[in-house]
Image: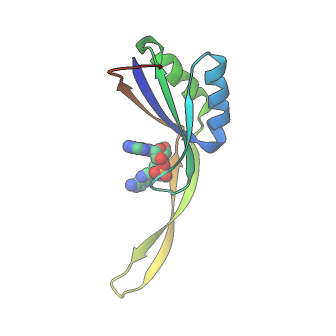
Amino acid sequence: MKLIFAIVNNDDSNFVQSALTQEGFSATKLSTTGGFLKSGNTTFIIGVDDDKVDDIISIIAKHSKKRQHIVPTAATYGTGMYSSIPIEVTVGGATVFVTDVTRFEKL
Ligand code: 2BA
């Protein structure tokens, strides 16, 4: 068995959730915050049999879009002056971790 952690954009999360449920997969949805942008995203926790991992990744990939975000960054000059330079970062589609489950119980 595997445990999948999938971090997706909030705007995609309902589509991912609906598609997983429709295909018969159980998932837990957490409200999370990205460490870099400090903005909200959604993390799904999904426990599945090994042979279903690729199916789940396909569902997540299908419903997770890439997005561009403009982020202000601070530049420091030798004169002690600062200025803010916006940079563009690409977020998503989804960040997915797959880990082994050593024990699974439903009590
Ligand atoms: P954030 O940490 O808010 O990162 C948002 C986007 O900012 C990232 O998109 C990436 O394009 C950029 N970014 C992140 N850290 C950066 C850095 N140190 N320098 C420059 N740019 C940086 P994604 O890679 O698609 O990640 C989307 C979200 O997935 C992340 O939101 C974070 O919540 C999660 N994530 C990504 N990689 C992770 C990892 N290795 N471990 C845990 N969570 C991760």
Count the labels in the image. 0
Point 49% across, 34% down: residue: 6
Q: Which percent across, then down, holds residue 28?
A: 55, 31
Dividing the image into 4 quarters, which one contains the N terminus? Answer: top left
Q: Which percent across, then down, holds residue 58?
A: 54, 22
The residue lying toward the viewer, choosing from 6 and 79, is 6
Residue 23 higher or lower than 73, as above or below: above
User: In which quarter of the view is residue 12 placed?
Assistant: top right
Point 45% across, 28% down: residue: 4
Q: On the rendered structure, is 99 left or right of 48?
A: left
Q: On the rendered structure, is 102 left or right of 65?
A: left
Residue 22 higher or lower than 32, as above or below: above
Q: Which percent across, then down, holds residue 79?
A: 36, 88
Q: Which percent across, then down, holds residue 61?
A: 55, 28
Residue at the farthest bottom position: 79
Residue at the farthest front position: 107
Point 52% across, 17% down: residue: 55
Point 60% across, 27% down: residue: 62
Q: Which color scheme is applied?
A: rainbow
User: In which quarter of the view is residue 49 placed?
Assistant: top left
